[in-house]
Image (cartoon, rainbow, N blue to C red):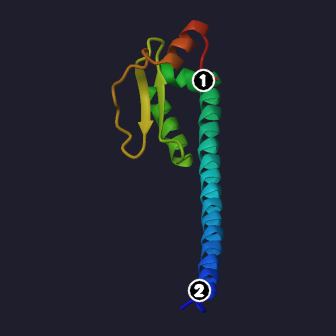
């Protein structure tokens, strides 16, 4: 028995080295997946910010929201179709009540008021549209 003891110790040492290397490899794979997921989320967020900036300053869209609700809703639906990363697009009035909304996948109108949200209150204080 004593003669195979060094062999067993060596075998366990090799298995432990393999396990540590494999664990480090799995850890690296998880880090890469997390970085990719963060990039996807960041890109989707940036698309949403860009869209909000464009819509809030586009005089043609703002005119359609005020005068032609159906055309404005059609515009939002087409944007939603071409930008599947964006789950919903909502337009509010000055009091925070949602006047137009397009949400995936139902496109149902959901009555809501955003006046209690901090970002909405900040916009009211600055008296500016979202950019």
Q: Relative to the observer, which residue lies in front, 104 or 13?
A: 13
Q: Nearer the viewer, mark 1 or mark 2?
A: 2
Q: Which mark is residue 5?
A: 2
51 displayed left or right of 77:
right
Q: Which mark is residue 35?
A: none
Count residues near mark 2 (Cα–Cα under 10 Å), then give few for <14, some for 14-19, many for 20+: few
Count residues near mark 1 (Cα–Cα under 10 Å), then give few for <14, some for 14-19, many for 20+: some
Residue designated by label 1: 56
In this rendering, is residue 80 above or below 2? above
Residue at the image position 62 percent from the left and 88 percent from the top: 7
Residue at the image position 54 percent from the left and 46 percent from the top: 85
59 displayed left or right of 116:
right
Name of the residue lying farthest toward the front: 2
The residues tagged by marks 1 and 2 sit, at their Cα atoms, a distance apart of 76 Å
Q: Relative to the observer, which residue lies in front, 89 or 73?
A: 89
Provide residue 101's location: percent of width, then percent of height: 43, 31
Quadrant for the C terminus, please. Answer: top right
Figure quadrant of residue 125: top right
Residue at the image position 60 percent from the left and 65 percent from the top: 23
Q: Earlier in the sequence, mark 1 or mark 2?
A: 2
Provide residue 18's location: percent of width, then percent of height: 63, 75
In this rendering, is residue 45 above or below 12? above
61 displayed left or right of 89:
right
Residue at the image position 64 percent from the left and 37 percent from the top: 46
Number of marks drawn: 2
Provide residue 64's location: percent of width, then percent of height: 52, 25
52 displayed left or right of 99:
right
Provide residue 127's location: percent of width, then percent of height: 59, 8
Secondary structure beneath label 1: helix
Q: Relative to the observer, which residue lies in front, 84 or 99?
A: 84
Q: Tell me if label 1 and label 2 are in contact, CB under 8 Å.
A: no
Secondary structure beneath label 2: helix
């Amino acid at each position: 028995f004593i003669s195979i003891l060094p062999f067993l110790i060596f075998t366990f040492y090799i298995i432990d080295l393999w396990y540590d290397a494999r664990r480090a490899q799995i850890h690296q794979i998880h880090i890469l997946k997390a970085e990719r997921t963060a990039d996807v989320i960041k890109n989707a967020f940036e698309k949403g910010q860009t869209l909000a900036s464009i819509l809030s300053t586009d005089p043609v869209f703002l005119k359609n929201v005020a005068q032609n609700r159906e055309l404005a809703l059609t515009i939002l639906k087409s944007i939603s179709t071409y930008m599947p990363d964006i789950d919903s697009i909502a337009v509010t009035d000055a009091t925070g009540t949602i006047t137009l909304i397009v949400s995936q996948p139902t496109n149902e109108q959901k009555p809501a008021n955003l006046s209690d949200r901090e970002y909405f209150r900040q916009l009211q204080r600055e008296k500016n549209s979202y950019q």
